[in-house]
Image (cartoon, grey):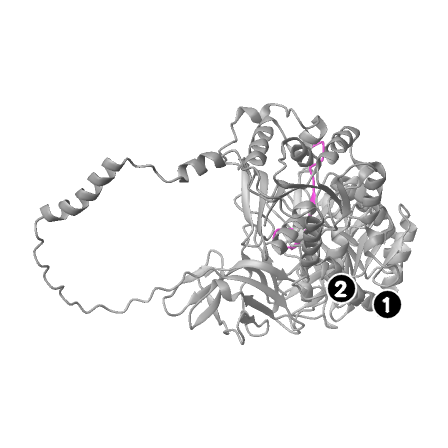
């Protein structure tokens, strides 16, 4: 049986794409499956897809080499999709043409449409020779009225229409009491997580999703003001991007939560980030399903979620594998979070139960439900009619009718022609040549995951499918340097197991910078850069540096182009800025010293070295809390006074233990975050803004005054 899924754009990372990829991959183990993307905007999908799933693109709009970028129909309105849906999904006259042609010609037995506009197309252009199934990934009453009206008109022309919650399926059945279309709930599929699950020990709450009004992250930030007042040692991370970002940034700054709440940006795959947390938070006004809830639960993280329509209440068993709290109530959200924060045993028990509950949504189970639905609809339909292109193909396949006289002449020619050919001379025997044996080896295509253990060592797990050879090694090479450091790759202990290498933090000395990973084969010196599958940094969240000096820190990460890399810091000593707070009159930094310590003879100061010659150096006395901890307050007035003629100035901060000691840079290197300049952001207060540089060192900027 051939099953075809219609997607608006298979090259994004949204929930509909993820759920479609998941169920398509599960179905591909037993059936012929394809995903038809109305548009192509990238070289390859951002999300993993089973190799047996065929990806078909109808319109190529890639930035540089898209064949359809200049097609005039792209600028013409769709004749079938209402303007609101057409604008949101980029449907136009060209999608009308291409989708109609595809639905007329497809040889699929089942076609599944995954968003309202595609449901409308399927109802308009779909054929009786295959089953037509629509999907609803939102909630019935939440669509814009025009979209709702068009989709209502389309549903009766389908064989089935599915929802992702049972509550929404009931709503659909109430709205369409007389249609023959089968209306059922088929939840989204979520594969079991490959990452090491959370152990519930990190003092971290994680939330993830589009930063849009319906998600109500503003409530979560407001709730965190209460949480932070009670448990300042816990932190909140919010992953995602969207139009609400500026408002959330302003709210965090207004409430003084810059050190407590971090906006992390988008991250894929997200399961590595769920596993870093001990609690997940979902504060939506509504959730059609709640893919993030299942993902977090699958990583062993209990979820505190608003009991909104419709998904959370069907996924979470309140008090067993998570907590449900009233919608729109920030106090209730804070109370739910604090309940799990304050009870380690309850939090870990709920995490274990959550991981077990998530198995209900395994893609294989959802695939079985799809097959049961197809069977209930009568299964694939007999081929009484063929696609439009089939008659020509059938006619071409019929045997040629050859006249008898022509047939006899052909036969005679076959007998006579060989007799007319000259007899070929006997060929000379080939000259024997001794050739060196040539071994053709498969090219290396290494794909690897990595995991940080309790000692801070990085275990690199290379998938066996992409490598071959008897002796392989893993090399790490600092960019722009070209001097690789090799570590042995141990062969798999069993069939299908990965090749493994360990980067030992206490043994390797990696200079400061970014390091790329390669697999090297000894037999032919083949060398190939490692593609990242999962870069797990959970072990870094609570990890501390090795005692003594020098200070070293490593963070593995996937590059923007999908390779596995390592950010390394290596310094004789380091001053870690654990807390940076902007007061009305001064900047206060609290931190810890690594690779050195304060003594009774120390007279430490923090110095600010200006960039350029437009200002003088500034300094502030350091309060020593203990041999490894410090606090310093830097008055804003001292910074302003150190400028020349009110020009904009930036100072880099460093700690000097004694007057003649080498300065120790102040920065934020410890933890799992590669680029602090993108995540750890602070407001400008009284014209002064602290920030972390590209190397995650602390600097302070004072802009130019108006008089300058």
The residue where tag 1 is placed is 346
Residue situated furthest bottom in the rendering: 493
For marks 1 and 2, the one nearer the N-term is 1
State yes or no: discs 1 and 2 in contact (Cβ < 8 Å): no
Instruction: Give the residue number, with chain letter if any, for mark 2.
Output: 355
In the image, residue 411 above or below residue 368 = above
Q: Point out the frontmost of discs 1 and 2.
A: 2
* Secondary structure mainly formed by the magenta segment: loop
Q: Is residue 148 shown left or right of residue 323? A: left
Label 2 Cα crowd, 10 Å radius (few <14 / some 14-19 / many 20+): many
* Residue at image point 63% right, 35% down: 126
**Mark 1, secondary structure of its residue:** helix
Residue at the spot x=9%, y=46% of the render? 420
Q: In which quarter of the image is the C terminus?
A: top right
Q: Which picture quadrant has residue 338?
A: bottom right
Q: Which of these two is toward me, 196 or 666? A: 196
* Relative height, residue 147 to residue 665 (above, below): above
Whether residue 214 is visible here, answered yes or no, is yes
The residue lying at 14 percent from left, 45 percent from top is 417
In the displayed image of the protein, which residue is found farthest to the front?
A: 404
**Which residue is more in the foreground, 426 or 651?**
426
User: Residue 424, how many percent across, how many down?
Assistant: 9, 53
Q: Is residue 692 magenta?
A: no
Q: Is residue 692 visible in the rendered structure shown here?
A: no
Separation of marks 1 and 2 at Cα, in angstroms: 14 Å
219 or 682: nearer the eye?
Answer: 219
Q: Work out whether 474 lies above or below 161.
A: below
SS at badge 2:
helix
Magenta-highlighted residues: 693-708
Q: Quadrant of residue 117?
A: top right
Q: Where is residue 604 in the image (x, y as percent from the top left)?
A: 72, 64
């Amino acid at each position: 049986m051939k099953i075809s899924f219609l997607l608006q754009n298979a090259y994004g990372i949204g929930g509909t794409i993820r759920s479609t990829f998941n169920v398509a991959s599960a179905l591909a183990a037993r059936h012929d499956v394809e995903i038809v993307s109305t548009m192509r905007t990238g070289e390859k999908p951002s999300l993993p897809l089973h190799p047996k799933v065929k990806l078909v693109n109808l319109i190529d709009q890639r930035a540089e080499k898209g064949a359809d970028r200049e097609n005039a129909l792209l600028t013409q309105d769709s004749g079938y999709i209402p303007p609101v849906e057409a604008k949101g999904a980029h449907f136009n006259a060209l999608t009308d043409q291409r989708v109609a042609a595809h639905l007329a010609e497809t040889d699929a037995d089942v076609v599944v449409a995954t968003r309202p506009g595609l449901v409308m197309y399927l109802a308009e252009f779909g054929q009786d020779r295959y089953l037509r199934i629509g999907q609803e990934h939102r909630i019935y009453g939440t669509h814009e009225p025009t979209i709702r009206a068009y989709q209502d008109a389309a549903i009766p022309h389908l064989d089935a229409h599915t929802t992702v919650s049972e509550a929404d399926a009931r709503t659909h059945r109430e709205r369409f009491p007389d249609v023959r279309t089968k209306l059922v709930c088929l939840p989204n599929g979520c594969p079991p997580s490959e990452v090491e699950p959370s152990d519930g020990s990190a003092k971290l709450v994680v939330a993830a999703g589009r930063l849009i009004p319906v998600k109500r992250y503003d409530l979560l930030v407001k709730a965190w003001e209460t949480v932070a007042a009670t448990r300042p040692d816990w932190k909140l991370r919010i992953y995602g991007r969207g139009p609400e970002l500026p408002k959330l940034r302003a709210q965090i700054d207004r409430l003084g939560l810059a050190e407590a709440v971090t906006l992390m940006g988008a991250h894929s795959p997200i399961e590595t980030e769920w596993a870093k947390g001990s609690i997940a938070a979902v504060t939506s006004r509504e959730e059609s399903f709640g893919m993030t809830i299942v993902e977090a639960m699958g990583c062993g993280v209990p979820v505190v979620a608003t009991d909104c329509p419709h998904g959370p209440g069907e996924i979470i068993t309140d008090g067993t594998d998570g907590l449900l709290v009233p919608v729109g109530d920030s106090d209730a959200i804070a109370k739910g979070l604090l309940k799990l924060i304050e009870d380690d045993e309850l939090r870990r028990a709920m995490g274990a139960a959550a991981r077990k509950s998530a198995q209900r949504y395994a893609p294989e189970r959802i695939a079985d439900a799809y097959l049961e639905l197809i069977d209930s609809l009568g299964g694939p339909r007999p081929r009484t009619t063929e696609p439009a292109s089939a008659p020509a193909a059938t006619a071409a396949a019929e045997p040629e009718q050859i006249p008898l006289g022509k047939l006899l002449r052909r036969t005679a020619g076959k007998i006579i022609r060989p007799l007319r050919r000259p007899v070929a001379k006997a060929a000379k025997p080939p000259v024997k040549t001794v050739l060196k044996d040539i071994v053709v080896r498969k090219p290396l295509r290494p794909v690897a995951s990595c995991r940080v253990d309790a000692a801070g060592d990085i275990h690199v797990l290379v998938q066996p499918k992409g490598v071959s050879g008897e002796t392989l090694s893993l090399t790490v090479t600092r960019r722009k340097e070209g001097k690789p450091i090799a570590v042995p790759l141990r062969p798999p202990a069993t069939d299908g197991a990965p090749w493994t290498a360990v980067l030992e933090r206490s043994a390797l000395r990696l200079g400061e910078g970014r390091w790329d990973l390669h697999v090297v084969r000894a037999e032919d010196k083949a060398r190939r850069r490692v593609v990242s599958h999962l870069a797990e940094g959970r072990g870094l969240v609570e990890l501390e540096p090795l005692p003594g000096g020098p200070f070293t820190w490593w963070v593995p990460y996937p590059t923007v182009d999908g390779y596995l890399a390592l950010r390394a810091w290596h310094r004789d000593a380091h001053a870690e800025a654990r807390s940076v707070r902007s007061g009305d009159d001064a900047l206060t930094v609290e931190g810890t010293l690594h690779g050195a310590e304060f003594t009774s003879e120390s007279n430490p100061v923090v110095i600010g070295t200006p960039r350029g010659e437009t200002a003088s150096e500034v300094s502030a006395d350091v309060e020593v809390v203990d041999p490894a901890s410090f606090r310093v307050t830097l008055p804003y007035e001292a910074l302003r006074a150190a400028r020349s003629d009110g020009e904009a100035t930036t100072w880099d901060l460093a700690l000097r233990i004694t007057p003649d000691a080498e300065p120790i840079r102040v920065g934020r290197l410890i933890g799992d975050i590669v680029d602090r300049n993108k995540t750890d952001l602070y407001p400008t207060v009284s014209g002064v803004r602290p920030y972390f540089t590209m190397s995650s060192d602390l600097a302070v900027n004072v802009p130019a005054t108006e008089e300058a």
